[in-house]
Amino acid sequence: MRIDIVTIFPAFFDVLGVSLLGKARSSGLLDVRVHDLRDWTHDRHRTVDDTPYGGGAGMVMKPEPWAEALDAIVADAARRPTIVFPSPAGEVFTQTTARELSGHQHLVFGCGRYEGIDERVFDYATMLGDVRLVSLGDYVLNGGEVAAMAMIEAIGRLVPGVVGNPDSLVEESHEDGLLEYPSYTKPALWRGREVPPVLLSGNHGAVDAWRRQQQLERTRDRRPDLLG
């Protein structure tokens, strides 16, 4: 999978060089390229924003640097990409979204700042790729970088080969619409707290039943909305 990221803060994404995603990049499973939006400006101050038409607080990101950045990325692409703009005005990002996007060959993340990106950029981008505005949730961040990082990690770990044991992906929270069951390791008794006896029983059927019950109880208690 190829992932391009456009941002005015490229250093945000240095963390993609560590842990499982870093290994996936080194092995060639993920081709991640980070681009500085200011490279497509043409003034001495490398300006990417201006005052909003109609008045109001804050600044809006100018359309031309974004158009030139996207043009350059797409010109170097082997296929039509999916262009994702993190935005509090977008569809909510879920595990289902992550799994869907993990099947795409080329993703481009456009990280806005200030009061956002000139709306015409989203329309222009539809000529270059399939555009998605996606939100992490009902809150506002200072920019799209943190949201893009979270999405890239959620998506990247689902790419075949990135996580060493694929079975671990099946038993996670949200994969079957429920929260994950609690996990324990040695020692069996720790500071007066015991591991549930069923996990020590060796009875795999009983363990599976207990884990399922824990999923249902956790989901009911913490996220009843997931149960419909």
Image (tube, rainbow, N blue to C red):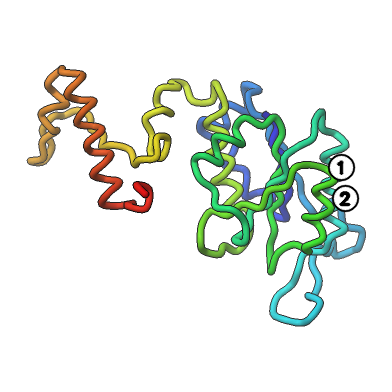
Q: Is residue 71 left or right of residue 141?
A: right
Q: Residues within 10 Å of mark 2 (few under 14, many from 20)?
A: some
Residue farthest to the front, as pictured: 228
Which x, y percent locates residue 77?
A: 82, 32
Residue drawn at (69%, 36%) of the image? 3
Q: Nearer the viewer, residue 80 or 66?
A: 80
Q: Above or below — where is 76 with respect to 126?
A: above
Residue drawn at (79%, 53%) of the image? 37
Q: Is residue 68 left or right of residue 111?
A: right
Q: Above or below — where is 25 with respect to 226?
A: above
Residue farthest to the bottom, as pictured: 55
Which x, y percent locates residue 67?
A: 85, 52
Q: Residues within 10 Å of mark 1 (few under 14, many from 20)?
A: few
Q: Nearer the viewer, residue 49 or 137?
A: 137
3D distance between C-alphas at marks 2 and 1: 6 Å
Give the mark count. 2
Q: Are marks 2 and 1 in contact (CB under 8 Å)?
A: yes
Which quadrant of the view contains residue 209?
top left
Q: Is residue 48 left or right of residue 220?
A: right
- What amino acid does circle 2 point to? Glu
Name the element at disc 2.
helix
Name the element at disc 1.
helix
Residue drawn at (65%, 49%) of the image? 11
Which x, y percent locates residue 53?
A: 81, 77
- What amino acid does circle 1 point to? Ala
Q: Which mark is residue 68?
A: 2
Which x, y percent locates residue 135?
A: 58, 55
Q: Quadrant of the N terminus?
A: top right
Q: Which mark is residue 72?
A: 1
Q: Is residue 154 left or right of residue 83?
A: left
